[in-house]
């Protein structure tokens, strides 16, 4: 390539972003240089700071620059109800639903023996410490409705059992506003087998 | 959003990239934090440096961290043949074709009166200085085959005319390996009206 080494570096560096290939990286580089140098500099600064300062919450493993994340550090949250999710994105999704006032435990993945992801990689010993403390009164399993998500939920349920803490699973079925016609067969099957009696 | 302010900043900053919305920015941030902090730091450094150091070549307007870009600074290039393109990406495409040994002039856009992009915005006075110098012996118009690209090509042709320098236009037609069936009607029409006699 006959172009500026600095520009070449920048294009290569942009490719560390997921879903960004050579062509998009090039387009991004030209765009920043031509139209938004201020944005590019802000990005450089916040990236540099985030890569060094953001670590995991010591209680729930979610990303934070402090010892505890904003949820765990909030005394107004119900610390006896722990919702277990796979990722920080799930935390945001549940927070935006507005119906959950407990705290989280973020696995940062799911059990995947073939990829070498076992209980330690998910930090389940941190979760177990919370169970031992006796403060937890309900575990809500909100891992994905995938094979791995279900397997992870079952594993954790077995782990929680000796502590006699109730474990619930978020409901699965037809999404609100979802048309049956476009729904996959498995979801539809589950929504039928787990049907509820309507109150009149 | 209940999450780390630093992380929130980083997600917002990533949205300055073209084609990156809230969801992708979030995915990128989590990916870097979880899987590639080294890549994230490299990106921060190369961005910071590029945003400050990369400017425009004084001769062809392409991006460079020096006074002249690698092409303009190369004495082995044919400096009498100037290929006019709309963007740095076009320079790379033409360079990779391997058939052009001249130099470029990069408009960084095309004429677009409605967007306030006129001859000055494209830096055509820099091009005209090169014409005045008497060193240019051919101008190859390689602006896009779009309405704006054609209008820009015509405008520059008129500008060059008084200097009696030959102006050529890159050929338009069916792409190599292209199937007629999938080609748009305009390209096909042009490939027929501009047909060439085959030598036997
Ligand atoms: Zn936390
Ligand atoms: Zn140049």
Image: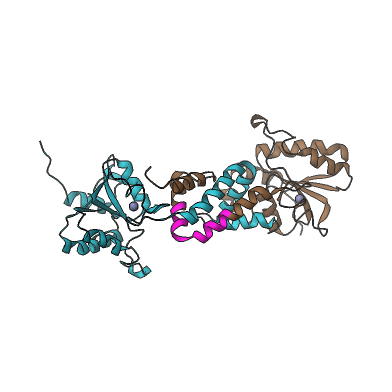
Chain colours: A brown, B cyan
On whether residue A36 falls in the magenta region, the answer is yes
Residue occupying the far right of the picture: A134
Tell me if residue B183 is in the magenta stretch. no
- In front: A176, or B136? B136
In this view, the residue farthest toward the left is B200
Horizontal placement of A40 versus A2: left or right?
right
User: Camera-side residue: A65 or A169?
Assistant: A65
Which corner quadrant holds the N terminus of chain B?
bottom right
Q: From the viewer's perspective, is residue A130 above or below residue B156?
A: above
Figure quadrant of residue B96? top left
Q: Position of residue B18 (x, y in %)?
A: 48, 55
Quadrant containing the C terminus of chain B in the rendered view:
top left
* Residue at (82% x, 51% y) in the render: A81
What secondary structure do most residues of the magenta stretch adopt?
helix
**x, y (%) of residue A171?**
72, 48
Residue most toward the top? A114
Question: Is residue B50 at least partly visible in the picture?
Answer: yes
Which residue is painted at 29% across and 64% down in the image?
B125
Horizontal arrangement in the rendering, residue A113 relative to residue A42 (left or right) = right
User: Closest to the observer: A106 or A157?
Assistant: A106
Q: Which image quadrant for residue A46?
A: bottom right
Identify which residue is drawn at 33% across, 61% down: B110
Q: Which residues are magenta?
A: A29-44
């Amino acid at each position: 390539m006959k172009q500026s080494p600095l520009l070449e570096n920048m294009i290569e560096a942009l490719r560390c972003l997921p879903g960004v290939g050579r062509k998009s990286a090039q387009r991004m580089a030209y765009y920043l240089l031509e139209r938004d140098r201020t944005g590019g500099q802000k990005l450089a600064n916040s990236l540099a700071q985030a890569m060094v300062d953001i670590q995991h919450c010591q209680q729930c493993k979610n990303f934070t620059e402090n010892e505890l994340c904003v949820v765990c550090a909030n005394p107004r949250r119900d610390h006896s109800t722990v919702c277990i999710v796979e990722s920080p994105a799930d935390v945001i999704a549940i927070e935006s639903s507005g119906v959950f006032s407990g705290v989280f435990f973020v696995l940062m993945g799911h059990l995947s023996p073939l990829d070498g992801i076992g209980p330690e990689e998910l930090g389940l010993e941190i979760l177990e410490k919370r169970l031992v403390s006796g403060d937890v009164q309900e575990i809500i399993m909100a891992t994905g409705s995938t094979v791995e998500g279900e397997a992870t939920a079952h594993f954790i349920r077995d782990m929680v059992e000796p502590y006699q803490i109730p474990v619930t699973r978020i409901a699965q079925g037809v999404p609100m506003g979802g048309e049956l016609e476009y729904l996959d067969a498995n979801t539809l099957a589950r929504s039928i087998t787990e049907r509820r009696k309507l109150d009149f």
